[in-house]
Image (cartoon, rainbow, N blue to C red):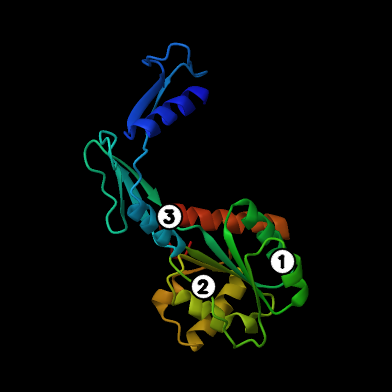
């Protein structure tokens, strides 16, 4: 770290970018890596402020973007692209995705357990509940709390393509309109608590509300990768399913 700091300071003074190699094949004989390998580090001291501001704006707007670096450039070496993610020859591209957002709706210890786990997964968390006690228990973990008032009143939920929705209601009259809104949104995952028998009854209720077959095909249920009998195992199962769907880029039924 000391050697890197010194080289970075020299690059800043000269105003030129550079590539530093440490470990195997490095001119710095006194710097050795524990693994016995080598690493190349690109020092960029000519950051394009306009491109950097654009990257920050895209990130805040929850839009995907990429940064492409040209290690051979001595001046401005990177550009921001929100349309294509191709890497030109001799360049390096890093893609930045919006933070995973999880919307939990319902009440009880299942919501609390999943809120705790979502925080450890570094997810943005929105909790909607008709029960004040549930909201209070989730307060330390949630980025936003929404008080549900009446069953058919659907709140303004933040539902984009990087959002997962998990309905954990025991009183199913609260979930119909909310689930329908989620299924018609860009949310990449929509799941609901309950047995297979409950899922069949839920499908009938959603169909009565106007849900199409394609919309119903997006609903995950019973929620989770594996059967669970307690709040904590349900939280693990549901979060694992959410992450699996997000990383595989596929939705639909199990």
Q: Which residue is mark 3?
A: 97
Residue at left 42%, top 15%?
28
Camera-side residue of 85 and 240:
85
How far is mark 2 from mark 3, CA to CA?
17 Å
Which comes before the other along the chain, label 1 or label 2?
1
Whether pointer 2 and pointer 3 mark residues with C-beta atoms closer than 8 Å, the reply is: no
Which comes before the other along the chain, label 3 or label 1?
3
Mark 2, Cα crowd under 10 Å, few <14 / some 14-19 / many 20+, is: few
The x and y percentages for residue 161 are 43, 66
The x and y percentages for residue 165 are 54, 68
Q: Residue furthest top?
A: 29
The local secondary structure at tag 3 comes to: loop
Q: Which residue is mark 2?
A: 158
Does residue 194 show up?
A: no
Q: Which residue is mark 1?
A: 139
How far is mark 3 from mark 1, CA to CA?
26 Å
Does residue 115 show up?
A: yes
Q: Is residue 161 left or right of residue 48?
A: right
The x and y percentages for residue 23 are 43, 18
Camera-side residue of 200 and 50:
50
User: What is the quadrant of residue 93 in the picture?
Assistant: top left
Q: Is residue 173 left or right of residue 158?
A: right
Residue at left 36%, top 55%?
65
Mark 1, Cα crowd under 10 Å, few <14 / some 14-19 / many 20+, is: some
Q: Is residue 209 above or below residue 168?
A: below
Camera-side residue of 238 and 86:
86
Q: Is residue 15 above or below residue 164?
A: above
Mark 3, Cα crowd under 10 Å, few <14 / some 14-19 / many 20+, is: some
Which comes before the other along the chain, label 2 or label 3?
3
């Amino acid at each position: 770290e000391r050697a890197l700091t010194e080289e970075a300071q020299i690059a800043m003074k000269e105003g030129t970018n550079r590539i530093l190699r440490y470990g195997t094949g490095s001119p710095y004989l006194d710097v050795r890596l524990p693994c016995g390998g080598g690493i190349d580090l690109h020092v960029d001291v000519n950051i394009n402020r306009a491109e950097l501001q654009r990257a920050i704006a895209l990130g805040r707007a929850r839009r995907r973007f990429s940064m492409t670096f040209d290690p051979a450039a001595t001046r401005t070496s990177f550009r921001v692209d929100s349309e294509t993610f191709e890497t030109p020859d001799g360049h390096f591209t890093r893609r930045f995705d919006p933070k995973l957002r999880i919307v939990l709706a319902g009440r009880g210890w299942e919501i609390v357990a999943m809120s705790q786990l979502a925080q450890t997964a570094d997810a943005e968390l929105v909790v909607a509940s008709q029960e004040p006690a549930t909201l209070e228990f989730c307060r330390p973990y949630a980025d936003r709390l929404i008080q549900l008032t009446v069953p058919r009143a659907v709140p303004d939920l933040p539902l984009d393509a990087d959002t997962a929705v998990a309905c954990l209601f025991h009183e199913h009259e609260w979930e119909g309109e909310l689930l329908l809104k989620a299924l018609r949104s860009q949310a990449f995952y929509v799941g609901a608590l309950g047995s297979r028998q409950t899922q069949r009854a839920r499908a009938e209720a959603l169909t009565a509300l106007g849900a199409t077959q394609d919309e119903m095909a997006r609903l995950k249920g019973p929620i989770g990768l594996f059967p669970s009998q307690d709040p904590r195992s349900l939280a693990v199962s549901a979060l694992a399913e959410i992450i699996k769907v997000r990383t595989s880029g596929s939705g639909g039924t199990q």
